Amino acid sequence: MGLSSKFVLSHESHSLEYTCPICQHLVELDCSTTSCSHVFCSSCITQWLSHALRCPTCNKDISENSVNKANVQLLSVAQPLAFRVLKRVRVSCPHSVNGCLWEGDYGDLHSHLIDSGVHNTEGLQQQQQNNGGSSPKLSSSATPLSKESIAKTFKEQADDKFGAGSYKEAMELYAGALSAFPQPNLYNNRAAAALMIKDFASCLADCDAAISMDPKYAKAYLRKCKAALEIGKFSVCCLTIEEACKECPDNSELANQCYRYKEIYNQVQLGEKQLTEKDFSGARKTFGSLLRETNCSLIVLSAARAELGLGLTDRALRLTLQVLRTDRGCSEAYSVRGQVLYYVGDFDQATKLMREGLRMDPDDSRSREAFKKMRNVETKLKEARNLVFVRKFADALTKYNETFSVCCNDLPPKSQLNAMLHAERGNVLLRLNMFEECIRDCSIAIYAKDDLVEAWVTKARALQGLDKVEEAQDELTPLMHKWGHGEPKIRAAYESAVFLVKKKNRVDYYKLLNIPSVCSEMEIKKQYKVKALELHPDRWSSAEFTDEQRKEAENKFKDIGNALEVLCDPQRRQLFDEGYDREAIEERIQRAQRAAHHGHGHGHG
C-alpha cells in the first residue's frame, strides 16, 4: 500500500497515472508495472495475481505464457523515465496532522520521515515557530505535539510498509515511533520486521525490550523463541518459553509451544550425540525431522554432516549451498562444503572452501584437522598416480596403501572418493597379477558407486586372469544392456569376455590330434590318419560298445575332420591360433571373401 491520496499535492494530471487501482493510494516507490503499462503497488499486484492472472485495469491476460517478455516488472527497471516522474510527485508529510509543515518530492519523503530530529516534540515546535507560530495544516481533531499521536502516525506508515513487504523501511519507521513514544507493541512490531529480513540479533533485542516493558506480552516471547531458534540458540528458546509460561500460566498457545521447543531441543541433543557416535543413519533421520521445524543453519549443516557420513554427497552439497545463499559469512558452511567436495574427489575446490572457512574462523580445530588430513591424502594420491604413470606398480601400491592408512577411518563407504581410490588401487593390483585382491577392491568401489565403469572393467579383467571367464561375462552382460551402446569401455570389455568364453569352450584341435601347436602340415595330416583309424565309426560298430560310446567316437571323428580343415589352411590356422572358434573363423573367412569380391568388382567397374 502506498501513500494516501490526501497527502498528494500535485495536480491529478501528474499523479492520477500513479494511483494504484487496487488500493486507490499513490503507489509505493518500489511499485510494479504490467506488460500493458499499468502501474500498481508491488504488494497489491502480487496479492491480486495470486487469485487472477489478468490486469485489474484492462483485464488483459498477464500470465507468464501470454507474451514472451516478463509481464510484471519493477517500474524503475521497465520504465526508468516514468519512475523518475513518480519521484517528482509533490506530497506533504503524513505527520501534517501533528503539525509537520514539510512538503516536497515523493522520492524524498522516506528520508524526511526517518529524520529523528524532525518529528519529535521539539522539532514540530520549531517548524511552527519558523512558520509564524501557526500551522494551517492541522485538522480540527488533531492534537499537535502529542507524542502518542506522533508515534501512531509513524506506526501507521510502518504497518503499511510491513504489509507491502518493505521490511527495512518499516523498521526505520517503527524506530521513529519508538523515539516519539516507546511502547511494547512497537518493539514487537519492529522485531517482526527484523525477523522477516533475518536480522535475528535486532529481533532478539527488540523482543527483550518489549518483555521488559510488559512481562506478560506473550507475542514477544514467541517471537524471541522463533529468532533464537533460527540462530541455533536452543537453550534460550527453552528458557524463554518457560519464563513465558510462568508469566502467562493460562495461555494455551504458550503451553503448546513450550512442549514443541523442548522437543526440538531434545532432538538436537540426540542428533549431535548420533553424529559423535557416527550413527549417521540415525542422525540423518533426526535432523531430517528437525528440518521440517526450522531452517536454522546449525540444523541444516548438521543434516549435511549426517548425509556426508553416509557418503550421500549430492544432498550434502545442496544443504550447504542452502546455508551459503542465506549467510555468506557462515564459516562452518564453507568447511562442511569443502569436506563434501573432498569426498567427491575435487581437491582444488575443497581446498579453496576449507581455507576460506578457516580464514573466517581460525580457531575451528575440527575444520583445521580435516584440512590437514585432506592435504595429506591429496599429496600421497598424487605420488601414487605419478608412480602408475611411470609403470612402477609395486611402489604405487605401497603409496596407495599409505593413502588409505590416512583416510580409511573417516572415509564414508559410499563416498565417491572411496570408490575412486579402491578402483585405482584395483587397477594397480591387476597389473601386479594380484587378481583376488583386485576383485575385492573393485567390488568395494562398485558398492560405493555402482556406475563406476573403470571398476567394472578392471574386475572383469581380474576374473579373466583367474580363468573365470564365464563369471566375467555374467558380470558384464547386464551392463552391456544398460550402458553398452553409449559406453565403449563396457562394450569392448563385454566383447572380450564373450571371445574368451568361446575360446575356452572350443575344441582344442592340437590337443585332439595330440600334436604341438608348431607342427607342420605333414605332421598334422599324419596324425590325422592315426586318429581317423582310431575313431572311425566302423571300429565302434560292434556290440561291445554302448550307444553312448559310439556317439562320442562319432563326434570326435567329426572334430578331427574339422581340425584337419582348419589346421591345414594357413589363414584358418592363424585365426585359430589367435583364439577364434570354428564358427567365428568361418564367419571371418566369408567376410574377407565378400570384401575381396566387392573390391574386385569395383576395380573392373
Image: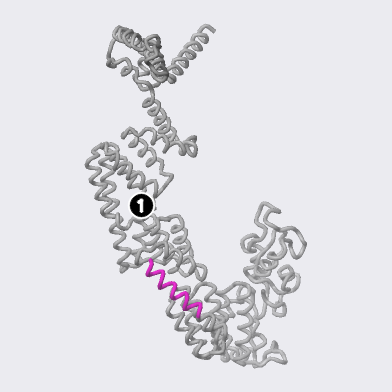
Q: Position of residue 55 (x, y in %)?
A: 74, 62
**Foreground pick, 497 / 165:** 497
Judging depth in this view, the residue of 103 and 279 nearest the camera is: 279
Q: How many marks?
A: 1
Q: Which residue is mark 1?
A: 348
> Quadrant of the rendered structure where residue 166 is?
bottom right
Verify whether residue 270 appears in magenta. yes
Residue 470: x and y in percent read: 39, 33
Looking at the magenta stretch, what is its main secondary structure? helix
Q: Position of residue 497 (x, y in %)?
A: 40, 31
Q: Quadrant of residue 368?
A: bottom left
Asked if one can make out residue 315 in the rendered structure from this viewpoint, the answer is yes
Q: Amino acid at mark 1?
A: Asp
Q: Is residue 275 left or right of residue 116?
A: left
Side of 59 relative to 76 (left or right): right
Q: Is residue 443 above or below residue 51?
A: above
Percent coordinates x, y for residue 514 in the rendering = 29, 16
Secondary structure under tag 1 reads: helix
* The N terminus: image quadrant: bottom right
Q: Is residue 329 magenta?
A: no
| Extreme-right residue of the structure | 58
Instruction: Please report the bounds of the magenta region as a residue range.
Output: 259-274
